[in-house]
Image (spheres, rainbow, N blue to C red):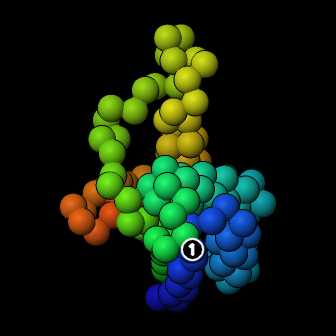
Amino acid sequence: MKKLYLEINSEKKYIKDVEALMMKANSEFGLSDDEYNKMMIAVTEVAMNAIVHGNKENTYKKVKVYVEFEPDVMKIMIMDEGDGFEIARLPDPTDMDNILDVHGRGIFIARAMVDEFFYAHHEGLGSEFVLIVKKK
């Protein structure tokens, strides 16, 4: 199993480092262009949410990205140091009552772009997102 790791300060400008990590991972993993683009959208959405909503852009807090992959499956873990949220309480952005509400869109988009999506909050430690991408 191949493993890669990145830790960034909670500043939007470091999202480029997350993108570079994913580009490096995919150079070995080998997703098709379409699947790579979907994975990249999901990862950048979740990483940006970790920076902005999780860590509230507090530059003393970190966002950690772990990537593990075998020949057919890539697992991406993104962790922040925030207070977490109730994922079940996010408004459905496709519901007409929420169509103009921007909350929940990133998570909705990320879930749609990967094969599996998991979220957990660890009290006092932050939030963890796990994205699973399988080669088609």
Task: Give residue 26's position: percent from left, percent from top.
Answer: 68, 75
In this orientation, does residue 125 appear?
Answer: yes
Quarter residue 109 falls in? top right
As drawn, the residue found furthest toward the right would be: 33
Number of other residues with Cα within 10 Å of mark 1, as a class: few under 14, some 14 to 19, many 20 or more = some
* Closest to the observer, 81 or 27: 81
Please tell me which residue lies in front, 58 or 87: 58
Residue 124, given in percent of the width and then of the height, sits at 24, 65
Residue located 55% across and 59% down the image:
57
The residue at 28%/69% (across/down) is 125
Report the residue marked by disc 1.
9
Q: Amino acid at mark 1?
A: Asn
Q: Secondary structure at mark 1?
A: strand
Q: Residue at x 49, y 35 (%)?
A: 104
The residue positioned 49% from the left and 74% from the top of the image is: 60
Q: Is residue 30 visible?
A: no
